[in-house]
Amino acid sequence: MKTQSFKKEETQHNWVIVDASDKVLGRLASKIADKLRGKDKPIFTPHVDCGDFVVVVNAEKIKVTGNKFEDKKYYTHSLYPGGLKTKTFKDMNATKPEKVIELAVKGMLPKNKLSNQIIKKLKIYAGSEHPHEAQQPVNWDI
């Protein structure tokens, strides 16, 4: 049997919506990363963007296990000496809950040019409202 390699034109991108309330961050992020890459489809090809669009709502209600709520840190650096800034999960979730999920999903994608395309298909919103009703997203239970 011959292995098929699908092209970009042969793929179909669907829209799914995920409710992140009371979900564990890492487990949710790994499932979203697989959905964005298209690993759940039989036409998965590693070098082609064949995944779906994912809309995440209620990002502010995400949970973490253990002491990560107080201990997990996010680092940014301004590239100047002494320019390291740190934020805990508690602070980051209070100010930018969308960024928490985005960083978790981005870390689970492959580190190549295709991941920049893939991460653009992820839409994250802190509340329960989103502007993607025209695309008719399907609810995805995790």
Image: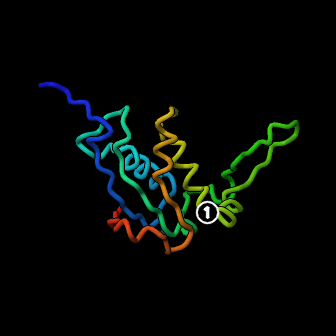
- Could you classify mark 1 by the number of other residues whose Cα lies within 10 Å: few (under 14), some (14-19), or many (20 or more)? many
Residue 77, horizontal then vertical, whole percent: 77, 42
Quarter containing the N terminus = top left
In-image side of 56 versus 45 (left or right): right
Closest to the observer, 26 or 104: 104
Residue 39, horizontal then vertical, whole percent: 33, 43
Farthest-out residue, front? 9
Per the image, label 1 sits on a secondary structure element best described as helix
Closest to the observer, 97 or 23: 97
What amino acid is at disc 1?
A: Pro
Coloring scheme used: rainbow
In-image side of 41 versus 96 (left or right): left
> In the image, what residue occupies the spot 56% across and 59% down?
64
Residue 133 found in image quarter: bottom left
Eyeballing the image, is 3 above or below 37? above
Closest to the observer, 122 or 62: 122
In-image side of 101 versus 18 (left or right): right
> In the image, what residue occupies the spot 37% across and 50% down?
35
Farthest-out residue, left? 1
Residue 142 found in image quarter: bottom left
Q: Label 1, on which residue? A: 97
Farthest-out residue, right? 81
Q: Give the number of callouts.
A: 1
> In the image, what residue occupies the spot 33% across and 39% down?
8
Residue 37, horizontal then vertical, whole percent: 39, 43
Residue 123, horizontal then vertical, whole percent: 49, 59
